[in-house]
Image (spheres, rainbow, N blue to C red):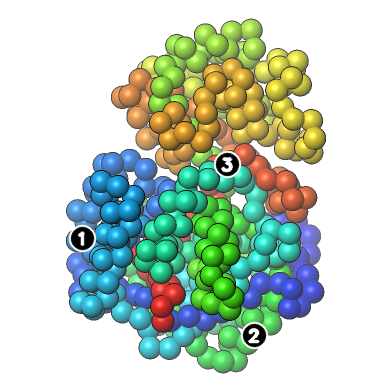
Amino acid sequence: MNYAGPAEEIPARSGLELTPFRGLRYDPDRVGSLAAVTSPPYDVVVRPDGLLHLESADPHNIVRLILPQASTPTVRDEQAADTLRRWLADGVLAPDTEPGLYVYEQADGSILQRGLIGALRLSEPSAGVVLPHEDVIPHVITDRAALMRATSTNMEPLLLTYRGNGATAGATAVVERTTERAPLLSTTTEDGFNHRLWAVTDPADLAEIQSDLAHHQALIADGHHRWATYLRLRAEHPSPSPWDYGLVLLVDTARYPLRVRAIHRLLHQLPVSTALTALDGLFRVRRLDVPLPEALESLAKAASDGNAFLLAGDGSFHLVDRPDPALLTRTIPADRPPAWRTLDATVLHATLLDHVWHIPEDSPAHIAYIHDTAATVEKARRDGGTAVLMHPVREEVVRDLARQGVTMPRKSTSFGPKPASGLVLRTLEL
């Protein structure tokens, strides 16, 4: 995210505290390839075919830890813990010899992103150090917390952003210097991204990073549920303890802007015809018999003028825009800033899901949140449901609302590129 204005600074010792740790990493001699054992974040792997693909890529793929498959949640979590213990005993995963921070680079030809992976001291939202911008789903936090308790491991870093001083000094300058050395690992995943990792262990470099970050706050770009899980687990363990920290990737967006994409909704039990009938007289609806790229272009154009959505699942696309102002006044809470009340995600959840379609937003049986546009459309078509395609919110709106302490509706944004899971883990037992 490339924000205008000076670097965001807050008083030292009340800012970010990123701590070295001994990372758990795959031994490349014990697996087929490093690429074959990585996975997208757990909440991106939503389709069974994607899960099976990852499981079959290598018997040690990280998905067996972050999304273990079993008959009950309890058995699932025990299975993940047993798998982790077995891989540690067999040397598939091994801890680095000394603690450090890790420089992590992702590149695919069109984008280059570098940041620091470390154990971040946890802070409450009221402290203003780490700013969430989305609501969370309670059952997901319960699910993630149970898995972390069972394994005593942070298996996937959150993606946090801050606005530093570019590459001229401080943490980002250390990042740039570090990438001039040979990396610990380098691998290219099937999505075309090359991933490289370096360890930062020099005391002077670590001190430079920590001194710089102590003046900054961060925005949660991806991983709200994992952050909320960290906070829940910290509250369960007397401090000081390893649970006072959580694994994060911290990116200076003055140097490396992120991409912002939408997260789409799949309404399992709502046929498109039923969804459209309920919109009669409340929104303008236009049928688009065009390919997906052209339909998304129409959505982008409509979204520039106001709230707009694209419905799919019946073989066509339906552009939904121009909501009835009286309907919005009646259904959207008036005690929030105008920027929040006019968000597409707000209108979707407060107006369409709650009042028009009567869809419970926290029920997995009724709604799924999917990052991949084509996959959302195809699954809706196959299952007879409705895909609701969203246009991404502008990045400056996200940070402005977060600074005001106003959270957006859940799954409103998708920042990326997201860190691959499986390159470095943090066990709380070292």
Q: What's the residue at 65%, 42% (across, down)?
A: 408
Q: Residues within 10 Å of mark 3 (few under 14, many from 20)?
A: many
Q: Nearer the viewer, mark 1 or mark 3?
A: 3
Residue 232 horizontal/vertical position (percent): 55, 59
Alpha carbon distance from label 2 to label 1: 39 Å
Q: Earlier in the sequence, mark 3 or mark 2?
A: 2
Alpha carbon distance from label 1 to label 3: 33 Å
Q: Nearer the viewer, residue 369 or 236?
A: 236
Residue marked by disc 2: 208
Q: Which mark is residue 58?
A: 1
Residue 304 horizontal/vertical position (percent): 67, 30
Q: Locate residue 16 relative to residue 174 in the image: left or right.
A: right
Q: Nearer the viewer, residue 97 or 33?
A: 97
In this view, 116 is above or below 324? below
* Number of marks present in the image shown: 3
In this view, 32 is above or below 326? below
Residue type, numbered disc 3: Arg
Residue type, numbered disc 1: Asp
Q: Is residue 5 visible?
A: yes
Alpha carbon distance from label 3 to label 2: 36 Å
Residue marked by disc 3: 410
Residue 381 horizontal/vertical position (percent): 35, 23
